Image: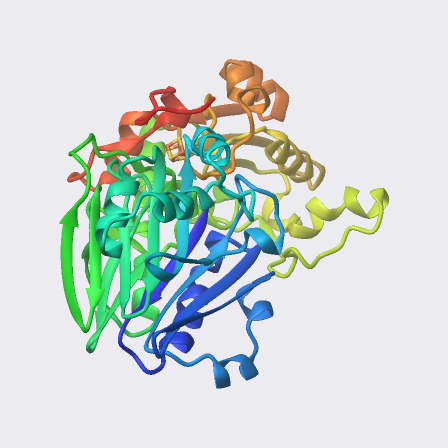
Amino acid sequence: MCGIFGISDNKDASKLTYVGLFTLQHRGQESAGMAVDSKDSIHYYNGMGLVSEVFSNDMFQSFHGLTAIGHVRYSTTGSSNVNNAQPLFFNSYLGQTAIAHNGNLTNASALRAQLQKQGAIFQTSTDSEVIIHLMAKYHRSNIEDTIADNLNKLEGAYSFLFLSPGKMIGARDPNGIRPLVLGKRGKSYILSSETCAIEVVGGKIIREIEPGEIVVIEKEKLKFKKFAKPRKTAKCIFEQVYFARPDSVFSGRTVQLARYEIGRLLAVEMKDIKADIVSGVPDSGTAYALGFAKESGLPYQTVFMRNRYTGRSFIQPDQKIREFTAHLKLAPIRDAIKGKTIILIDDSLVRGTTSKKIIKNLKKSGAKKIIMAIGSPPITNSCYYGIDTPTKKELIAAKFKIEGIRKFIDADALHYLSLSNLIKACGNNRDKDFCTACFTGKYPTKTEK
Ligand code: SF4
């Protein structure tokens, strides 16, 4: 998963893009980068690490330009190195172009093999690079038509930002799997993975880019174009479950409210369960637990102290230290736990190993019983669209039925939210066309398995 942000026609474009990327940091922490259209020439800079580590104050002294795009990366295909950091830059018949991609192309390996056979030399191991070679090889007289033609050769999930001299272009895949939102700030247009970044830079949200739509921003004007035949919309439901920031808006309401509603519906489904308190695994589980508490009348209680500073910079010097890092990240608050039957809510269960550790920790701290509640159905299939789920054989729900999972994590009871209630909560009674393939195995596109 990654985050993309771009802003047009603003003398502070690079600084605002920095703030936008900073706001989208939760979508990727491996690398960050930015490209700026500087007097008809594209300048770019990418580096490994957090946004605050990659860019320095000095850089902005020389990184001038009226339009900029940026990217934060969390790798799902391609290794974690600076070559794969985005925006990617290329110079072709159409001139200089930078691109930033969120999502995962499911036919990238086949396209790469075909292009290499025809002589293309790839510089990175990311799936995103195929669009560059396609655009260089199959071009029309202008960049927007070239983009539109070549997007039709891609399968999978993508939101793209393209920057070429004088133009910023955004595009979203025909199923709308990954998000892309349009905003405005004065005369500037903004494109962002999430609404939170538009609002943080002082912009107003206009609308989502529609599935299969391109928007061209040039000289303070907008031009929309459909590049693909309509397909079934399949927005990733995991954005609301786990990935997106609580203050971002999806389906007309904030992610926080959707999560609260998930918790409320969990309480409806679990109305006969008895417990002393309800709590959530931070961060997303907290909103679930608050919704559950409201519906059930059970008191909400914080049972963990979360250490927010154990990011990628936290080194684990040896095995002995590694053993207590789980406790270091989430430390139980003994007095809140002792002798209590706790309903503990988490957004999802992937391998089950983290929940197992958490439950062990709570029981060691004196919890009487742990009733585990999950705010989504069992994950039985891998994601091919840019969320880093492991292979099917590593997914605990692909191996065991619910009772087997309960035993593995050592919970006293285990309940998963039904798919229909998840869709109800995330869709806000207006959207129901979500991708739910990790729960159902029904993928909205062809996949390269
Ligand atoms: Fe999202 Fe799951 Fe679909 Fe992947 S498979 S896009 S995680 S809903």
Q: Quadrant of residue 319?
A: top right
- Left/right of residue 14 with respect to residue 7 in the rendered view: right
The residue lying furthest to the bottom in this view is 61
Q: Residue at x 57, y 19 (%)?
A: 393
- Residue at 27% x, 66% y is 167
Q: Position of residue 221 (x, y in %)?
A: 15, 68
Residue 379 percent across, percent down from the top left:
46, 25
Q: Is residue 326 left or right of residue 93?
A: right
Question: What colour scheme governs how the chains and residues are painted in the rendered image of this protein?
Answer: rainbow
Query: Residue 336 or 164: which is nearer the viewer?
Result: 164
Report x, y in % for residue 301: 50, 49
Numbered-mark total: 0
Q: Quadrant of ligand 1?
A: top left
Residue lying at 34% horizontally and 56% vertically, measured from the top left: 161
In depth, the one of 327 and 131 nearer the eye is 131
Left or right placement of residue 415 versus residue 335 in this view: left
User: Measured along the vertical axis of the image, is residue 156 above or below residue 44?
Assistant: above
Please give left or right for residue 2 compared with residue 235 in the image. right
> Is 220 rendered above or below residue 227?
below
> Which residue is at the front of the view, 418 or 26?
26
| Residue 288 visible here | no
The picture places residue 181, in percent across and down from the top left corner, at 26, 56
At a point 53% along the width and 51% down the height, the residue shown is 302
Above or below, 152 against 225 in this view is above
Q: Visible in this render: residue 74? A: yes
